[in-house]
C-alpha cells in the first residue's frame, strides 16, 4: 500500500549540498510490538522497470541494520518516539532519488509517500537587500563679506530672482537658501550683506 497515511514522511522534497548531510523523517501512526522500519531508495522516476534499493532498517532490538553493498558509515537510522530518521552523511549527486520508508505487514507492504532528495554542488542563495544610499544634506555656507576672499566667494554664488510678493522684491537670493525661510525678515537680515539691488 503506497502513500499510506500510516507512514508520514517529511519533507516531501529536500535539496542538499554535495558532501553535506541530509535528514529524512518517517513518522509511524501505528504501534507495533516488534517495530521494524525499512528505508528504500528509488534512483529514477517511478516506472514499471524501476526498482527499490534496500538501504537500512531500524529494529527495536538491533538498532540500525544495513543492506548489502551499502556504505555503512554514510547511513544510519535513529528513532525519536514515533519518528524514524534516516541520516545520510557526505551525500553525492548519485545519492539523489526518492526515499521511501516501509513496514512489512501480513501480507501487505505499507509505504510512505516518499521524500525526493536532490544533491547539488551549490545551493541557491538569497540575494541580499541593497542598502539605500542616504543623499548628503547640502549645506549653504555664505562667505564673510568683510574679506577679499568673501567677495570672491560671493561672486561665485549662484543667485535667483526672489519672486514678487515674498517681501524682498527686486533682490537676488542665493539658490541654496531659496524657499528655506518662511520668515521674510529673518531671510532679509541674513542676506543683507549680499543683497544686490536691481
Image (cartoon, rainbow, N blue to C red):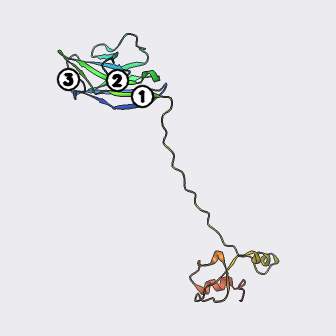
Disc 3 secondary structure class: loop
Task: Please identify the residue farthest to the left as the structure is shown.
Answer: 106
Residue depicted at 25% across the width and 27% down the height = 3
Residue depicted at 27% across the width and 20% down the height = 102
Where residue 165 sits in the image (x, y, percent)? 58, 89
The mark found on residue 118 in the picture is: 1
Where residue 173 sits in the image (x, y, percent)? 67, 81
The Cα atoms of the two marked residues, 2 and 3, are separated by: 22 Å
Is residue 78 shown left or right of residue 158?
A: left
Residue depicted at 35% across the width and 20% down the height = 41
- Which residue carries the number 2 mark? 99
The Cα atoms of the two marked residues, 3 and 1, are separated by: 31 Å
- Which residue carries the number 3 mark? 31
The answer to whether 90 is drawn above or below residue 10 in the figure is: above
Q: Which quarter of the picture shows residue 161? A: bottom right
Task: Please identify the residue farthest to the right as the structure is shown.
Answer: 148
Is residue 116 visible to us here?
yes
Disc 2 secondary structure class: strand
Q: If the image is split into quadrants, where does the N terminus sit?
A: top left
Task: Please identify the residue farthest to the top as the structure is shown.
Answer: 68
Amino acid at each position: 500500500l503506497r502513500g499510506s497515511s500510516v507512514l508520514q514522511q517529511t519533507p516531501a522534497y529536500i535539496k542538499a549540498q554535495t558532501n553535506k548531510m541530509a535528514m529524512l523523517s518517517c513518522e509511524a501512526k501505528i504501534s507495533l510490538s516488534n517495530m521494524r522500519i525499512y528505508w528504500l531508495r528509488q534512483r529514477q522516476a517511478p516506472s514499471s522497470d524501476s526498482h527499490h534499493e534496500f538501504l537500512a532498517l531500524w529494529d527495536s532490538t538491533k538498532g540500525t541494520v544495513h543492506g548489502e553493498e551499502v556504505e555503512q558509515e554514510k547511513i544510519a537510522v535513529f528513532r525519536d518516539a514515533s519518528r524514524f530518521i534516516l541520516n545520510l552523511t557526505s551525500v553525492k549527486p548519485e545519492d539523489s532519488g526518492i526515499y521511501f520508508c516501509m513496514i512489512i505487514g501480513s501480507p501487505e507492504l505499507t509505504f510512505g509517500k516518499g521524500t525526493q532528495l536532490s544533491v547539488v554542488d551549490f545551493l541557491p542563495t538569497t540575494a541580499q537587500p541593497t542598502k539605500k544610499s542616504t543623499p548628503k544634506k547640502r549645506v549653504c555656507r555664505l562667505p564673510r563679506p568683510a574679506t577679499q576672499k568673501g567677495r570672491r566667494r560671493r561672486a561665485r554664488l549662484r543667485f535667483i530672482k526672489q519672486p514678487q510678493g515674498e517681501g524682498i522684491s527686486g533682490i537676488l537670493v542665493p539658490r541654496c537658501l531659496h524657499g528655506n525661510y518662511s520668515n521674510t525678515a529673518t531671510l532679509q537680515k541674513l542676506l543683507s550683506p549680499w543683497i544686490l539691488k536691481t
